[in-house]
Image: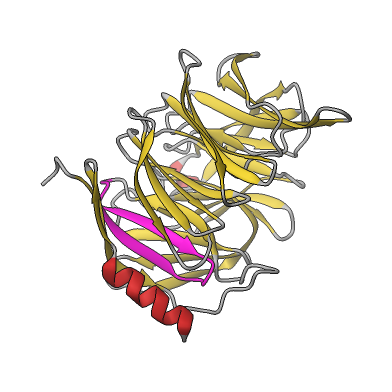
Amino acid sequence: MKNLLISFLFNLLLCLSVQGATLEFAFQLGEHQQPRLDVLLPDVARRLVFNKTGTKLIAKGMGGTIVEWDIQTRQKREISHIHAKRWFAYSIGENHLLVRKANDNVALLSLESGNETLLTSGQYESGSLSADNALAVLSKGDNEVEVWQLAKQNPKAGEGQKSAKKLKTLQTSFPVRNGLTLSDNGQFIAAAEGSYRDGEGHRTAIEIWNATDERPVKVFNTGEILGVWNVLFSPDATLLAVDTQKNAHSGIRIWEIETGRQRLAKSEFEAYWTRALAFSPTSDYLASGDEAGNLRVWDISEGESVIWETYPTGIQALAFSPSGEYLAVALWDATIQILHWRKNNER
């Protein structure tokens, strides 16, 4: 009852307007459950993404179930024939999911037709899709990144079906243990690689590859950090963001892809992990959410947070809608808070 009251009061009072940006509580998806600290509830959303019209929100739960929420009716449908061991990625242009299923098959799933296409099989640890669903990247957590080309088959083979072939395999400097992502335009690949050496501790580096090249074009060395939860390109593919963890404190960093210049470097957050990151559609803001329930929105040009609020429980996932109307916040109590997002110069 106490947690319900705290959550209600937070939602009632959330109307923030600080240094050019506004967040207002809109509505809640899902029913509140008592959070657990030893293990996250199966219905807590590990990953969130809006479709291209912003009318649907797709969520993959910690238990493996993928659901699709209708933003207008606030009703959900379970994509019941897919139980994702891991959810790799979503192509916003084609409304397809790339998932590793419980049987270790890696499959493409059309959310519109329900068609499922087997890409490959094996214990892949990470993967990503371009927005137009033309390219995919996969890694088994070793020193290799596979680049796959996805092409529409002959229409007689079935609407929405895809054929796939592996184009090449990139050799990374260290095992791809901390994440793999492809920019929306399919131009860049980011592989977050980890190593451990006695006397040096854990180190994480991010190699940036042009999808057409055989060697990385940039290497961002994060230094002696334990690892990352998130590695993501900005929608315009000019920036790369990661979260960091060192000495039991989390942080975030943002780099320019072209120049390698570091645009944002924050550390010593109270939370052990910053579990969620999301760029705004215009690539000028970054939202972060951590285990202590801190929701921050960072103005990248200023290098400072312009909004900072704390929920009564941890934040697991974040997503902006493509129009920038909403920011979705997935909490450890299994609810998804939908907030109105607006820059103050917008009407």
The relative height of residue 257 versus residue 270 in the rendered view (above or below) is above
Q: Position of residue 162 (x, y in %)?
A: 53, 42
Q: Position of residue 51 (x, y in %)?
A: 36, 52
Q: What type of secondary structure mainly makes up the magenta span?
A: strand
User: Which stretch did the figure color magenta?
Assistant: 323-341
Say left or right for 175 vs 156.
Answer: right
The relative height of residue 227 versus residue 80 in the rendered view (above or below) is above
Q: Position of residue 93 (x, y in %)?
A: 38, 42
User: How many marks on residues?
Assistant: 0
* Residue nearer the viewer, 164 or 7: 7
* Residue nearer the viewer, 143 or 336: 336
Residue extending farthest right: 198
| Point 31% across, 46% down: residue | 322
Visible residue check, residue 164: yes
The relative height of residue 338 versus residue 154 in the rendered view (above or below) is below
| Point 46% across, 12% down: residue | 259
* Residue nearer the viewer, 201 or 70: 201
In the rendered image, residue 329 lying in the magenta stretch gets the answer yes
Say left or right for 259 vs 103.
Answer: left
* Residue nearer the viewer, 277 or 45: 277
| Point 56% across, 16% down: residue | 212
